[in-house]
Image (cartoon, grey):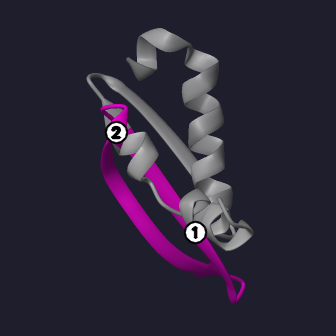
Amino acid sequence: MTPDAKRLAAGSADDIRALGWAVAVHNDYRLGGIPHTFWLFTKGEIAIKGEGRTDAEALDQVRAAIAARGASASA
């Protein structure tokens, strides 16, 4: 995968959705004039969020939280 393709994939939630997670909220906003983004995913009764300056940063937080929950949350 090229560096540009990796960067674009990091900013996409497709891999998270493929694990059965649903986007409950996605919001882009400015905090002190600086762009930020917020993502909230749910699966059953579990909710996981990520927040950061970019989609890639916020989604990486979500991916890390899913990985920390183990295989039972991503199956």
Q: Position of residue 12 (x, y in %)?
A: 48, 60
- Crowding around mark 2 (Cα neighbors within 10 Å: few <14, some 14 to 19, many 20+) is few
Q: Which residues are magenta?
A: 18-41
Question: What amino acid is found at the position of numbered circle 2 in the picture?
Answer: Ala
Q: Quadrant of residue 31?
A: bottom right
Q: Classify mark 1: helix, strand or loop.
A: helix
> Of all residues shown, which one is farthest toward the top?
72
Q: Label 1 to label 2, Cα distance in Å?
A: 17 Å
Q: Classify mark 2: helix, strand or loop.
A: helix
Q: What is the chief secondary structure element of the magenta stretch?
A: strand
Q: Is residue 65 magenta?
A: no
Give the residue displayed 43% in from the left and 17% down from the top: 73
- Crowding around mark 1 (Cα neighbors within 10 Å: few <14, some 14 to 19, many 20+) is few
Depicted 65 relative to depicted 5: above or below = above
Give the residue displayed 72% in from the left and 84% down from the top: 32
Label number found at residue 8: 1
Q: Position of residue 66 (x, y in %)?
A: 54, 28
Relative placement, left or right, of 49 versus 60 is: left
Q: Which residue is mark 2?
A: 18
